[in-house]
Image (cartoon, rainbow, N blue to C red):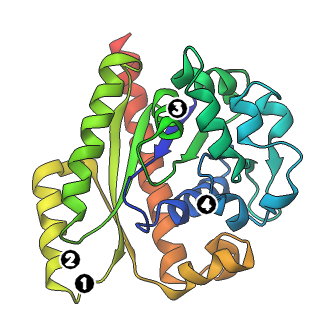
Amino acid sequence: MTRILAVANQKGGVGKTTTCVNLAASLAATHRRVLLVDMDPQGNATMGCGVNKADLEASTCDVLLGEVSAADAIVSVPEGDFALLPGNEDLTLAEVRLLQEIGREMKLKTALQPVQGLYDFVIIDCPPSINMLTLNALTAADGVLIPMQCEYYALEGLSALLDTVEQVRVTVNPKLEVYGLLRTMFDPRINLSNEVSQQLVDHFQDKVFRTIVPRNITLAEAPSFGRPVLFHDRNSRGSLAYLALAGEILRREDERQPAAAAAH
């Protein structure tokens, strides 16, 4: 059963791409088959995996516009043992062109269907805004993983994202759910961080991952080397946090199997 997770938050700089790259590497380290889809025109996930976004033969843009198949655009990541559907600034063009097309929010879902069975997890890095690219990701996904910093404005942005998730669920993707909230760049010495963290747990309860990703210099450095933190410094706090997150997600999936079987 393939689990497709869109990693989304319209607020930039909350650790979305960091989460995508390092969660993909951590799940792959547990021998799961993983595809990372870069839907952000900045192409940071692509670069963070050690793939040059300027040299792509085919990208997510070409796939969304139906010019190549997903299978022909997917590349292997140099370090990390997972697959990547790479993206770059051409995605801005894709977004503009999609606006004129019928069924425009279904393009990614349709493109992934022939390949998704090859993977246990498909992780989609969304742009830091609610636009046509993000809507494509939400339409294709089973769940939304929301990375967020525990700061004052974070909760405000969260409600707008939750409204969008609900709209997508009602209109085009009834199976879409909030898969989990991930606290990122966490500094326990800051009182406000602890307060916001507690508010999240009080309000969302078991939707909040137990794993907390700390502020960690190694996590910030790893992308400049084009590698997941697992291969940059395996024993860093950042690396251990994403390995823990992968473990938590796998436990959730194991718990779902009997429930899903009982429902049928």
> How far is the residue under mark 3 from the one under mark 1?
35 Å
Secondary structure found at label 3? helix
Q: For the point 45% across and 31% down, which residue is it? A: 142
Image mark for residue 21: 4
> How far is the residue under mark 1 from the one under mark 2?
7 Å
User: Of marks 1 and 2, which one's residue comes earlier in the chain?
Assistant: 1
Secondary structure found at label 4? helix
Q: Which residue is mark 2?
A: 193
Give amino acid for label 1.
Pro
Q: Is residue 87 visible?
A: no
User: Of marks 4 and 3, which one's residue comes earlier in the chain?
Assistant: 4
Q: For the point 78% across and 59% down, which residue is it? A: 53
Q: For the point 44% across and 39% down, which residue is it? A: 253
Q: Are marks 1 and 2 in contact (CB under 8 Å)?
A: yes
Give amino acid for label 4.
Val
> How far is the residue under mark 4 from the one under mark 2?
24 Å
Is 185 located above or below residue 197 in the figure?
below
Is 254 located above or below residue 46 in the figure?
above
Give the left or right position of residue 110, taking residue 75 as reference: left
User: Of marks 3 and 2, which one's residue comes earlier in the chain?
Assistant: 3
| Quadrant in which residue 49 is drawn | bottom right
Q: Which residue is mark 3?
A: 136
Circle 1 packing at 10 Å, graded few (<14), some (14-19), many (20+), is: few
Q: Is residue 27 visible?
A: yes
Q: Are marks 4 and 2 in contact (CB under 8 Å)?
A: no
Give amino acid for label 3.
Asn
> How far is the residue under mark 4 from the one under mark 3?
20 Å
